[in-house]
Amino acid sequence: MSEPNEQRQERQQKDILEVELAVSRWLRVGVVLSAAVIIVGLVLFFMEGSSGYPGSSYPHSLPDIVSGIASFKPYAVITAGLILLILTPVLRVAISIWVFVREGDKLYTGITTLVLLILIISFILGKA
């Protein structure tokens, strides 16, 4: 009778390990992708010799960043890379919610969901 319990625990440990590996892969992908975007922005900056914006201005909003990227403006590309870098750990929080739901842990699901909501609200209300 203890065998099924041991098998269940072994399966749970295997599931946890798989999730941790998937999360670590996503974190690595996020960091590498953001670094690549920032490097592209730096290369553009050195090739053009300017930020792509007049004076000391830079893109403040998401539409400004997107239009700047479409125009290959170096600061917009660098800013996009920085945003990707910031969003990488936020993705980790979102994945944690999925993991806790899957495990049936209501307390940690609630706490982590609250953390994600606070992060989202801070991004919406934050100023550049």
Image (cartoon, rainbow, N blue to C red):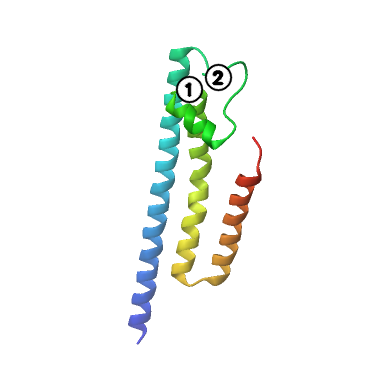
Q: Please state, as top left, top right, bottom left or bottom right, where the N terminus lies in the image.
A: bottom left
Q: Residues within 10 Å of mark 2 (few under 14, many from 20)?
A: some
- Tell which of 110 and 1 is nearer to you: 110
Residue 58: image quadrant is top right
Q: Residue furthest bottom?
A: 1
- Tell which of 38 and 59 is nearer to you: 59
Provide the secondary structure element on which disc 2 rests.
Answer: loop
Q: Is residue 39 left or right of residue 110?
A: left
Q: Residue at point 61% right, 16% down?
A: 55
Residue 94 badge? none
Residue 128: image quadrant is top right
> Could you say where residue 33 lies in the image, as x and y percent from the top left?
41, 36
Q: Residues within 10 Å of mark 1 (few under 14, many from 20)?
A: many
Q: Residue at point 57% right, 28% down?
A: 59
Asked if residue 77 can be seen in this view, the reply is no
> Could you say where residue 97 lies in the image, as x and y percent from the top left?
50, 61
Q: Residue at point 64% right, 47% down?
A: 122
Provide the secondary structure element on which disc 1 rests.
Answer: loop
Q: In the figure, 56 relative to 90: above or below? A: above
Residue 53 badge? 2
Asked if residue 50 can be seen in this view, the reply is yes
| Residue of label 1 | 73
Q: Residue at point 48% right, 39% down?
A: 84
Q: CA distance from mark 2 to mark 1?
A: 7 Å
Query: Looking at the image, do the residues carrying marks 2 and 1 touch, with CB atoms under 8 Å apart?
Result: yes
Query: As shown in the figure, which amino acid type bears the numbered disc 1?
Result: Lys
Query: As shown in the figure, which amino acid type bears the numbered disc 2?
Result: Tyr
Q: Is residue 61 left or right of residue 38?
A: right
